[in-house]
Amino acid sequence: MNNKQVSSQLNQLADLMELKGENPFKVNAYRKAARAVENSRQALDELEKGPEELPGVGKGTAAAIQEIMNTGTLEALQNLLEELPTGLPELMKIPGLGPKSIHVLYRDLGVKNMEELENVLTEGEVRKLPGFGEKKEKKILEGILRMKERPARFLLIHALPVAETLEKRLMEHPDVQRVKPAGSLRRMKETVKDIDLVVATERPTAVGEWIVSMPEVKEVINHGETKVSVVVGMGIDIQVDFRLVEPRHFITALLHFTGSTEHNVRIRQRAKEFGWKVNEYGIVDSENERELTFTEEKEVYQQLQCPFVIPELREDRGEMDVPGERLPQVLQEGDIRGDLHMHTRWSDGSASVKEMALAAQKRGYEYIAITDHSKSLKVAGGLKEDDLKRQREEIDAVNEELDGITVLAGIEMDILPDGRLDFSDQVLSELDLVIASVHSSFRQSRDRMTRRILNAIENPFVHIIAHPTGRLINRRDPYEVDLDRIFEAAAETKTILELNANPNRLDLSDVNLKKAKEAYGIHFSINTDAHAPEMFSFIRLGISTARRGWLEPEDVVNTYSLEALRKRLKAIRNA
DNA sequence: GCCGTTTTCGGCCCGACTGTTTTCAGTCG
């Protein structure tokens, strides 16, 4: 039973308690405990004094955690699962419908699932309930429609251009002074539910009117004095919340809407210690009602006597608990000196070795590694041993021709379903860089998959394990694998783990990166896995994910000079 | 349910918007 499994049971319990109408603070206590478990760098059975060591975990939740670890589940959870209809939790996903309303719908109309809810809505039963009315009925129906039409969360890479376009367009409006995206998009989370834009203006009403009249607006969800929510169709149909604030409130509003909620809670608790209140308008002294405003976010943190926290770290994963000097000096875009995972026309890429090298050079890189697929991956035109030899000749020629960039000869080698590797040690020993990865039989048992990957890690010729969990965001779950054993073995053999920067992968994830670094001292390589030169731009997402994972330049081998990188690779073969 | 050198009880971040209400509850972030 790992931390993730325990926390998901606690969360499930909290969800059901909420639906039942339990004390919201009690519900929150379980959610908080779930988060503490998930974010703990230690496994639960490694905590010396038990779960109560974790922040926000007391007697009650510690007992619940123990029960899950001992029995695999919780009696309280099982009871609620039996008591409440299985179709009730999914109703929570309907925007505008919360636990209180669902409770009433269930109690008074016997609504047990989505289908029954749609029935009573169309029959006009809902408007008769106390606290409900015609408009609310309509709102719920629209909410169901919205939920069905759109994915719950969009890939960051799809939302970013929408935010950037709107930002630029708003800046051109004469009444707008400043605009900045906030929310999970600014924190560069891998997926976002909607886009938040904070807008500084002296004329919120005029700007609000202008926003709802934009041609791309498909639907107006809210239109108040300071908050306008719309759905825009700009490549994707996504909700955008505009917060219209006075210029002097811009910074505290930006801080507020950047979140995360959990980080905001910590900020406000901190302010309380000084007798202050933080809201989107500033910091207010509770005694004399004096309001402080700011021109930079840094000043707010300074006022609260905390170190400045960059948006990517604002998740309450420890950033408010460590002294400033222990916050990571996170990676910057310019720190990356090369890309160690890419494909060419030799397998399933669309460019030549030289074209990739030229594109990398243009980005200012000092080196790249060409890592086409290996022979077993037939769908991708994997290379055989003699192909590798001919490719090496081409790489040598490019190195001869081009100055200022070095092309390493590598491979992305399949780890076969039975754990064998696709090439012999003899072949691997002749390559500058060997990446190993799983591309088949994703549904093997946890034990088998773990042993399969361990086998690759233990091979001294394997330098990097690519996309270690195999997940595709929104499309395919990570395969079952014991990551702790993977991390342990990688630490021992000095094997590098990849942060694959492809926007669909971002694998390892932010949470796993942090854990692998802090608990095991792993080194990483941030690679784009580019199949065409323009895909080098994915590095931006890799860097932001690395920042979210608290990585610093020394944790990432492709920030090293070529010489230092070669040394690091050599250390693997000698480990 | 958790938490506390002002507290072992009484708080728990804070405000906007909407809809159903005549002063507030639910939802959201």
Image (cartoon, coloured by chain):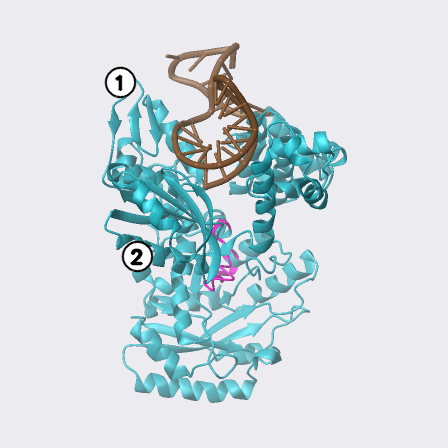
Chain of the residue where label 1 is placed in the rendered structure: A
Where residue A74 appears, x then y in whole percent?
A: 70, 34
Q: Circle 1 sits on which residue?
A: A288
Where residue A418 appears, x then y in whole percent?
A: 68, 69
Viewer-nearest residue: A40 or A87: A87
Asked if the magenta segment contains residue A326, the reply would be no
- Occupied quadrant, residue A314: top left
- Occupied quadrant, residue A407: bottom left
Q: Secondary structure at mark 1?
A: loop
- Residue visible at 25% across and 33% down in the picture: A293
| Residue A472 visible at all | yes
- Judge if badges 1 and 2 mark residues of a common chain: yes
Colour cyan maps to chain: A
Q: Is residue A252 above or below residue A441?
A: above
Say which mark, if any, is on residue A168.
2
- Residue visible at 59% across and 36% down in the picture: A134
